[in-house]
Image (cartoon, rainbow, N blue to C red):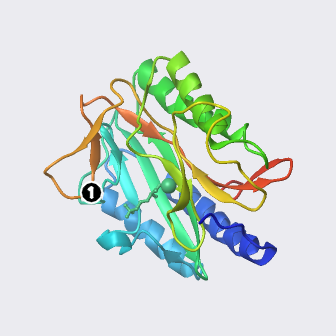
C-alpha cells in the first residue's frame, strides 16, 4: 500500500529531513585525505543523537553502522571501517534519520583531493540527474516520467545507470512502496499523488550498469567492471503543483 502522509506526518518528516541535511553538512566538513570512514560514521551518529533523532540505518536489517560510506567502485552500502580516504577517491555518504518514527534518506557524493575531469563530470551529472527526475514530480505525473528523465540524461552524458538498485517510498520505514527506478518509460507506472513521500536516488557509473556483491561482507555493492560510481539522493514530498525537497536547505 502506498501511504499518503497527513500534515502532521509531513511536519515530522520535514524535521527528519532537516536533521539529515544538517548531518550531511557536518560530515562534509570532515571529508579530506586521511580521514577514516569510521570517524565520519561517529561524527554522523553523535550529531543525529544530539539532535534527538535516531540514525535509522544502524541495525536496519542488521546493518552495523549509522551511515553508508561507499568509495570508488563501491556503489552503495559501504560499511565504515578504519580505511582512510585518499587523494583521488570519490566517496558517497548515504544516511537515514528517524524523528519520532518518521524517516528521511539522503546521499551525497564528494571528491577527495584531485580527480580526473571524467570523475568530476560523473559526480556533477549524478547530482543533475536527480534534478532532472525531480523536475517531473507533481500530483498526476507517473513514476516512469521520473525514471526516463534520469536515464535519458545519464545516457546523454555516456554514463551507466544502475538498474538493480532503485529509489523508493519512505515514511514510517526507510523503504516503502513504490519503487522509483532510475530507468523506465515516461507515461507509465504508478500515478503520483499529493502527500506521497519518495526517495529519488540516481546511481551512475563511468562504465557498466551492472553491479554485484563482493565476498568482503554481506553489504557492499560494487560495479562489476570496477568503474567508479556516484550517488545522489533526496527525500521528496509530492505536492499538487510539484514537490518539496525534505532533505534540502
Ligand atoms: N539509505 C539507503 C537507501 O538509499 C538504505 C541503506 S540501508 C542500510 O535506500 F542498512 F544499508 F543502511
Ligand atoms: Co534510499
User: Residue shown at 31%/33% (left/top)?
Assistant: 210
In the image, residue 182 above or below residue 248: above
In the rendered view, does 237 fall on the left or right side of 62? Answer: right
Seen from the viewer's position, the closer of residues 84 and 225 is 225
Q: Locate residue 197, reporting x and y percent.
A: 66, 60
Q: Determine the residue located farthest toward the left in the rendered image.
A: 215
In the rendered view, does 137 fall on the left or right side of 112? Answer: right
> Mark 1, residues whose alpha carbon is within 10 Å: few (<14), some, or many (≥20)?
some
In the rendered image, is residue 29 in sight? no
User: Residue shown at 40%/21% (left/top)?
Assistant: 116
Q: Locate residue 90, reporting x and y percent.
A: 39, 38
In the image, residue 100 above or below residue 6: below
Q: Determine the residue located farthest toward the right in the rendered image.
A: 241
In the rendered image, is residue 241 in sight? yes
User: Residue shown at 52%/71% (left/top)?
Assistant: 173
In the rendered view, does 117 fall on the left or right side of 15? Answer: left
Q: Locate residue 45, reporting x and y percent.
A: 45, 72
Image quadrant where one finds the N terminus: bottom right
Q: Locate residue 224, reporting x and y percent.
A: 24, 33
User: For residue 134, which quarter of the picture?
Assistant: top right
Image quadrant where one finds the C terminus: bottom right
Seen from the viewer's position, the closer of residues 37 and 149 is 149
Disc 1 target residue: 219
Seen from the viewer's position, the closer of residues 137 and 248 is 137
Queried on whether the Cβ of the residue with tag 1 lies below 8 angstroms from ligand 1, the answer reads: yes
In the image, residue 106 above or below residue 221: below
- Total marks in image: 1
Q: Secondary structure at mark 1?
A: loop
User: For residue 63, which quarter of the picture?
Assistant: bottom left
In the image, residue 138 above or below residue 175: above
Amino acid at each position: 500500500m502506498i501511504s499518503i502522509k497527513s500534515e502532521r506526518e509531513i511536519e515530522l518528516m520535514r524535521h527528519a529531513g532537516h536533521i539529515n541535511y544538517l548531518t550531511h553538512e557536518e560530515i562534509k566538513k570532515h571529508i579530506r585525505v586521511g580521514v577514516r570512514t569510521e570517524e565520519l560514521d561517529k561524527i554522523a551518529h553523535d550529531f543525529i543523537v544530539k539532535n534527538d533523532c535516531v540514525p535509522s540505518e544502524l541495525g536496519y536489517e542488521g546493518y552495523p553502522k549509522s551511515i553508508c560510506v561507499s568509495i570508488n567502485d563501491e556503489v552503495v552500502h559501504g560499511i565504515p571501517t578504519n580505511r582512510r580516504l585518499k587523494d583521488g577517491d570519490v566517496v558517497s555518504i548515504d544516511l537515514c534519520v528517524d524523528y519520532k518514527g518518521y524517516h528521511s534518506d539522503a546521499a551525497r557524493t564528494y571528491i577527495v583531493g584531485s580527480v580526473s575531469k571524467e570523475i568530476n563530470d560523473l559526480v556533477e551529472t549524478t547530482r543533475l540527474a536527480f534534478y532532472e527526475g525531480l523536475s517531473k514530480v507533481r500530483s498526476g505525473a507517473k513514476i516512469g516520467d521520473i525514471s526516463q528523465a534520469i536515464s535519458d540524461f545519464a545516457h546523454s552524458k555516456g554514463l551507466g545507470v544502475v538498474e538493480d538498485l532503485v529509489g523508493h517510498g519512505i515514511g514510517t520505514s526507510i523503504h516503502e512502496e513504490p519503487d522509483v527506478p532510475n530507468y523506465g518509460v515516461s507515461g507509465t507506472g504508478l500515478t503520483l499523488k499529493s502527500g506521497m513521500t519518495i526517495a529519488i536516488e540516481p546511481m551512475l557509473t563511468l562504465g557498466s550498469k551492472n553491479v554485484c556483491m563482493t565476498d568482503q561482507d554481506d553489504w557492499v555493492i560494487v560495479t562489476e567492471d570496477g568503474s567508479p560510481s556516484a550517488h545522489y539522493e533526496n527525500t521528496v514530498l509530492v505536492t499538487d503543483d510539484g514537490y518539496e525537497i525534505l532533505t534540502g536547505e
